Image: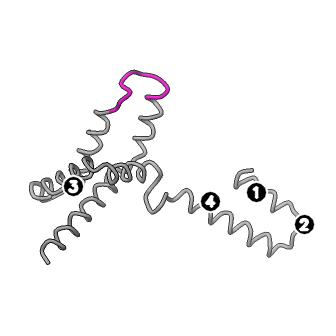
Amino acid sequence: MNDQELIVAVGNSNMESEAKAEIVESIRGEFKENKEGYNGWKNYETWDVKLWIDNEESDYEYWHERAKEIREEEEEYPILSLADEMKEFYDENNPLPEAGVYTDLLNAALGEVDWYEIAEHIMEEIEEETEKEER
């Protein structure tokens, strides 16, 4: 039973109105929470890409180094530049180059990634690293 069906079932039950209202609000709150993000990120896809970047040492070092370079080079929109570069990198390195259902699904998932959110987080991380080094 999904959340909407559960809300309808509660609404049709013999419970008192106040109890129904509390349960429905609780369900809606949980549903909204699940739709608004994943582990503090915009969505699962964004969280997953950042998790892999953080857990693959070479990727972590590469993107942090690129962020430092872009921050030094690009005064106006460094986060946007990093986000665009990351999106382009992952699009170009798609391991499924042939058309097909798996390629479509992978492209759909990558299309949901909020590259700006990841780039912004990496820029914040290098700012913190820089502050620690200066101390």
User: In the displayed image of the protein, which residue is found farthest to the left?
Assistant: 73
Which residue corresponds to the image point at 12% horizontal and 74% vertical from the top-left? Answer: 134
Q: Cα distance, mark 1 to mark 3?
A: 45 Å
Q: What is the number of callouts on the image?
A: 4
Q: Residues within 10 Å of mark 3 (few under 14, many from 20)?
A: many
Chain part drawn in magenta? 94-103
Q: Which residue is mark 3?
A: 64
Disc nearest the viewer among 3 and 2: 3
* Element type at mark 2: loop
The disc label shown at residue 31, or none: 4
Mark 2 surroundings: few (<14), some (14-19) or many (≥20) residues within 10 A: few
Sequence-first tag of 2 and 4:
2
Q: Tell me where residue 17 sits by quadrant.
A: bottom right
Q: Where is residue 114? Give x, y as percent.
A: 37, 51
The residue shown at (27%, 45%) is 86
From this view, report whether residue 63 is shown above or below residue 132.
Answer: above
Q: Percent x, y for residue 32?
A: 58, 61
- Compute the Cα span from label 2 to label 4: 23 Å
- Farthest right residue? 14
Q: Residue at x 21, y 63 (%)?
A: 126
Q: Main secondary structure of the magenta part?
A: loop
Residue identifier under label 2:
14
Label 1 is placed on what type of residue?
Leu
Residue at mark 1: 6
Spatial CA span between label 2 and label 1: 14 Å
